[in-house]
Amino acid sequence: MIRVENLRKFFPVQSGFIASLLNRGNIPTVKAVDDVTFSIRRGEVFGLAGESGSGKSTIGRLVLRLYDPTSGRVVFDGIDLESLSSEQMRRMRSRMQIVFQDPLASLNPRMTIGQAIGHPARIHMPELSPAERRNHVMEILQAVGMNPPEAFYDLFPHQISGGQRQRVVLARALVTSPEFIVADEPIAMADVSVRAILLELMMKMKEEFHLTYLFITHDLATAKYVCNRIAILYLGKLCELGPINEVYSHYAHPYTRALLEAVPVPDPRHRRTEPMPSGEIPNAINPPPGCHFHPRCPIARENCSIQEPPLREIRPGHLVACHYAEELLK
Amino acid sequence: MPKNPVETPEILPEGASWEVELNRVGFVRRLLMARRWYGADWWFVAIGGVAVVAFIIVALFPGLFAPYSPFVQVGPPFLAPEAHVDMPVLIVPKKSSVKSLQDLAVPPDANRPQISVVEGYPTAGALNTESQKIDEQIKDEPRGLRLRPVIDRYPSLQETLHAVVDGQDNASVVQESQFKSVAASFPSLREAAPIQGGAFSAGGFILGTNDIGQDVLSRLLWGTRIALTIGFSSSIVSLLVGVPLGLLAGFGGGLFDRLLSLLMDSLYAFPGLILAIAITAVLGPSMLNIIVAISVLYVPTYYRIVRGQTLSVKEEVYVEAARSIGARRLEILSQYVFPNVIQSVAIIFSVNVADAILTGAGLSFLGLGLPPTMADWGIDLARGQTFIQTAWWMITFPGLAILMVVLAFTLMGEGLMEIYNPKLRER
Amino acid sequence: MPEDILYSIRNLTVEYGTRAGPVRAVDNLSLDIRRGEILGLVGESGCGKSTIGKALMRLHEVPARITAGELWFDGRNLMELPAGKMPEIRGAEIGMVFQDPMTSLDPVESILDHLTETVLTHEPKTSGAAAKKRAEELVERLGIRRERLKEYPHQMSGGMRQRVMISLALALRAKLVIADEPTTSLDVIVEAKILDLLKELQKEFNLTILLITHNIGVVAEVADRVAVMYAARLAEVGTAEEVFANPKHPYTQGLLKSVPNIELNSAELYKMGGQPPSLLHPPKGCRFHPRCPLVMDICSKEEPEFEPVIGDHLASCWLYQEHEGRGSSERHEVHNA
């Protein structure tokens, strides 16, 4: 359904006037996304995991064309998004929506809940009369569990709780009956006891609205509960991709192994067996040459600092970008 | 054990889900509790607010409050505040039944009354004005009496009064103090009613009079109207010009933004008064031109603030969210950016008015902008300059008035700003 | 006070004044921190755990006030000390590591300066050179290369800054380190390394650490004992193994079931109904009763005491305590998570 091909997004680094003069036009860039290719199948929950600087949030926005890629393309349902005019792209948005991480920040503080949810309907469903639109918003509010919907319609975002806000943001994304939703860390800001409920809600909505999700997260434990397939990102590049149980149990990339190992397990008897990679995530302006992970990789060889490993299929449906992935599989 | 903790509205413990309840605290309770919470700021706003309202009422209805007209002479010049006015009084023989000037009216064909005055004193003027006034009033009455006195001038007080004693004149008009000083030697004469006219109004002058006998208080009160008109009008015009420009520049960016910012920064770099002087010198003196000049002065202020706010609001997640749902740029600007930006504008408006009033007064002080016939604080200030030693009240009271108005608006504006942005206070 | 208890919190109550009335962020809480242990204080947002952290150092400012309770630190009741004496204790005897090191570190001081200044402030007799040497050694021990000492906070990554914070706490050889969400803003690999570091330091310097967090996994990884907070009160306290294996309080049970465990293959997460209660109007009786799957009549009427259930494992729940309508012979069997 969604195909991302050789997507790149480089952000220029803001530098002073003199510095840019000295550099003579070679503006340093943050290579947030560097040649990423994958596809998302209709009806699946595709996980995109990584730490900070991995580019996962950027990819989420590139897929929806909230940013324009530096190069590469995004194909949605067979349509190359770049070929669309801005007006056509605008209309396309009714089919693809995003749920942001911070519900309070993503709601206009001066708009009531009803207005906020109704706004996409106003834009994309002009055939509805105001009364019909209001009914539709009420229906959606009920669907996300805000009962009675009338009680919430005229409230402002700061007058409802965090969990409720997250539902509102979800409702706003659903009001135009989209086919595809990008969820950018949707539960990161919710309380622990509420997260499970929100996840269940999202899955229920998926069933009801026949949705496809791109689930962006840093929490691999949560991803296991909702994602069908997962892609691991490091410093703008894909490390590994495949069905989630496959990747978790038969990881083929050293970084994936480190990530899985690092996830805190709520069991005091559990002890970590593998050491953590040395160092920290380097700067995305000057990533290490060759395989970006090589300075920290426990199995790095000379080859790794010279040649970038391509993304290749190592087991059916399971891709990895590492020269020596076979060693981990043993 | 410590007493109940002091309540303040904004500081909360960590990540509370019950913030929601806090936010539902009613407006009325907030009003009532505001004094305890906001402390000094509440007082600023309250006092400033009350003063501003008072000034606005005075500006709207100066006639209700001013005892006299500000444009004409109503008293002797250079009268100190609350000084007693030395009224001209009608002096008549004790045996006469005349009580006031009106009683001297006679039928048209009878002998006109003769009244003596001392040469060189303004009493003749008052007498004339008052007689004419009374004459106008009574000539249409059925009795047909007229009051057109013949005025005899004498070189000295003694001779003036003697003329009445001797019967040459029916009455005399001299100043009260003069008569009192010699009353002993004229036992046959008495005072009748004072003559109220022209430069001699019997009512007191609370703040004194200026160099041409106008009541300072009345001029102050009427001046409020001018000051506030200038203040509000120029602020509103600046707002109407600066805010949209700031919005468009901040939101749109690019060349438009660069050029406009350059223009605005240049304007802003000028010292305010100098720029205003330049503009009024070109445009000429009138109320409208002052308003235009001062408006130009403050457009950059609104522009900068709105542009800055727009730039930061533009980066907010909810604006990105608006884009993601497919809103058009204009929709985003009007529904998402604008409502979140204007709150800062509303608050600086108050302080802006204060500043505009100050600048306006400055302009008229320098003689630019307003025609000198208007009752304006700045003009009064300028006038009072020369007499600062002899008639200090001429310059002091207009100065105080300016001070109080500016203070009132500033207090209110700054207080509101503090209350509205408590986060700044907290950190 | 028994020798092995470093900090004994007794009946602590901390109130905030808010526009809707006073709020008790911590309500009559008693807890002991034993020497040399890592005690994990876990709870969700708004339960009061961060408030405790600051209260232990009497860091609160108006409108928050400690309105009741005693803080027995190393044999002294800190509540009896005049406020002016507290700065001597802060840093030197009780160190704190905050969640966001960016705002706690002085942006215009290099790390080295920061450390040496801290040492010199509390131990003025130390020479400048000795302080510098101590700072260098410490920082190396914490995994920062010597050359980086001259850097400023904004030049360092989050993990690095957190190490600096820890080193500040250690520079003065604090007896107790209060770590308030120390790894929440960090990536998961860095988090793992910092947690390892904390465990090593605990052994090496015989530190006592109070680790405040909402992350159950973190607590499981490092804590010796666990205290679970709910709505300004303690729900359960016990050794980590005990609490995770046999949680007694229904809240703990629900919490543990709702946390995703990457090692398990369970299909679904447990969904706890309702939401954390308002501290402005807490529920009558046991504060968890509106959401409790094992709720009984008494739970909505009276609050249970915080009492031992088995040995050192304490919980405040009517399931384990005698009350009207139930004899002491009945003991409700608790099903494990």
Image (spheres, helix red, strand yellow):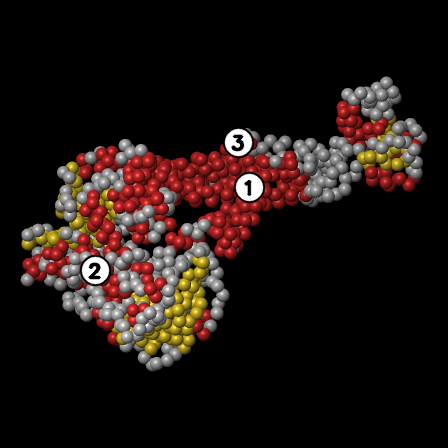
The secondary element bearing badge 2 is classed as loop
Residue C105 image position (x, y, % from top left): 35, 62
Q: Quadrant of residue A97?
A: top left
Mark 2 vs mark 3, foreground winner is 2
Mark 1 touches mark 3? (CB < 8 Å)? no
Q: Which mark is residue B358?
A: 1
Position of residue A62 relative to residue B131, above or below, is below
**Mark 2 and mark 1 on one chain:** no
The secondary element bearing badge 3 is classed as helix
Residue B356 image position (x, y, % from top left): 52, 40
Residue C168 seen anywhere in this rendered image of the structure: no
Q: Quadrant of residue B405?
A: top right
Residue B93 image position (x, y, % from top left): 90, 33
Chain ID, mark 1: B
**Mark 2 and mark 3 on one chain:** no
In which quadrant is the N terminus of chain C drawn? bottom left
Position of residue B388 in the picture relative to residue B421 (left or right): right
Q: Which mark is residue B289?
A: 3
Distance of label 1 from label 3 (alpha carbons): 16 Å
Q: Residues within 10 Å of mark 2 (few under 14, many from 20)?
A: many
What residue type is disc 1 on? Leu
The residue at the point 18 percent across, 44 percent down is: A210
Residue C332 image position (x, y, % from top left): 26, 70
Distance of label 2 from label 3 (alpha carbons): 72 Å
Residue at mark 2: C260
What residue type is disc 3 on? Asn
Q: Residue furthest bottom?
A: C3
